[in-house]
Amino acid sequence: MLINAAHSGTAPFFYLLFHHNVNDVPPFAFHPDFDKRRAGLSFDHVSIPSTLPYPTYVSVHGHTVMHSPEYRSSWQLLNGGLLATTIDYPVVCDFRNQDMGLGGQGTPMAVIADRDLYPGYDYYINLGGIANISYQNDNRWIAYDLFPFNQVLNYYAKKLDKSYDKDGAIAAQGIVNQKLLQQLQTEPYITSLPPKSIDNSWVMEYWIEKIDAYNLSVADAMRTYIEFAVHHVSSIIPADSKILWTGGGVHNKFFMRTIDSNGLYSNIPDSSIIDYKEAVLIAYAAYLRWQDKPNFISSATGAERDVVGGGVYLA
């Protein structure tokens, strides 16, 4: 049973419950007897079918505040033990550190869901705060962070007192700055080979500072960044490939139109997959952890071997 909960405070958290009989229950709902108030959260918008079984455990990723493969450490804002004792269910969390302890990047996790839950595509691109990609090459799964995406666009939208650029309308009014575009395309992270990953703090402290240095208007900064993202994706993926696009960035209609002009617009799923694929991923990662099966693929992360990632806190 997959559970998508609302969030408390400013950082979004998905609290996902997984029951072994996953085919017998609808996704994204809470069991009616689960006392949501005990966790200090608000789930008023969540539908609650009366037929759901009790959950087996709760899977939580948490908001990442530090991710440093060079120090083999990733830190999420979460107290798994406190959550387990508060809600009286086992909690699976802290997924990334085992992979990093074995020399991996601890990311991307999405490749495990792409392989097992969404088969049949040539490429998988998730346009979240950081865009990532998964694909197979010579029967080996490759996955890595492409570039910061929504974090950059939302940063500039907030300069106009907007939380995001709805439909990409602001970016569509801008003009591409060729010097900035060229710099972004030649940045060391962009030109380096995988496995590789991006830390959220690096986005603010390094990446966005590079863009800010050009003192562009919000529209021009956004338009240039859209052009960079489209060019970079197009340099990796052949035209007419079968691609599964997910993540909030898919709602940016201007970006998707620009991608379309490069022959890469394909297989846009319904909104439940676009918006909740990452939530499903975290639930599935916990399911594999509970079954003592690998949920990190070493060919994607660079670890010494496939990893069973995640800590378990009993209620």
Image (cartoon, rainbow, N blue to C red):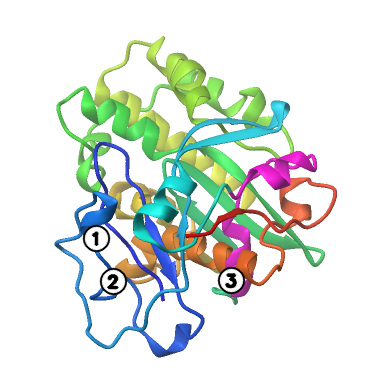
> Of the numbered discs in the image, which one, if any, rests on residue 30?
2
Which badge, 3 or 1, comes first in the chain's sequence? Answer: 1
Picture coordinates of residue 288, whole percent (x, y): 63, 68
Residue at x 26% of width, y 23% of height: 218
**Amino acid, disc 2:** Phe
**Residue at point 79%, 46% (across, down):** 303
111 or 91: which is nearer to us? 91
Amino acid type of the residue that numbered disc 1 sits on in the rendered structure: Lys
Residue bearing the label numbered 3: 121
Q: State the mark number for residue 36.
A: 1
Q: Residues within 10 Å of mark 1 (few under 14, many from 20)?
A: some
Find the magenta span and give its range: 95-116
Q: CA distance from mark 2 to mark 3?
A: 31 Å
Q: Which residue type carries mark 3?
A: Tyr
Helix, strand or loop at mark 3: loop
- Horizontal relation, residue 315 to residue 115: left or right: left
Question: Residue 107 appears at what percent x and percent y?
Answer: 63, 46
In the rendered image of this protein, does residue 230 appear above or below residue 259? Answer: above
Q: Say whether disc 2 or disc 3 marks the residue closer to the N-terminus.
A: 2
Q: Which mark is residue 231?
A: none
Asked if residue 177 is among those painted magenta in the image, a careful observer would answer: no
Q: Secondary structure at mark 2?
A: loop
Task: Classify the position of the N terminus by image quarter.
Answer: bottom left
Q: Are marks 2 and 1 in contact (CB under 8 Å)?
A: yes
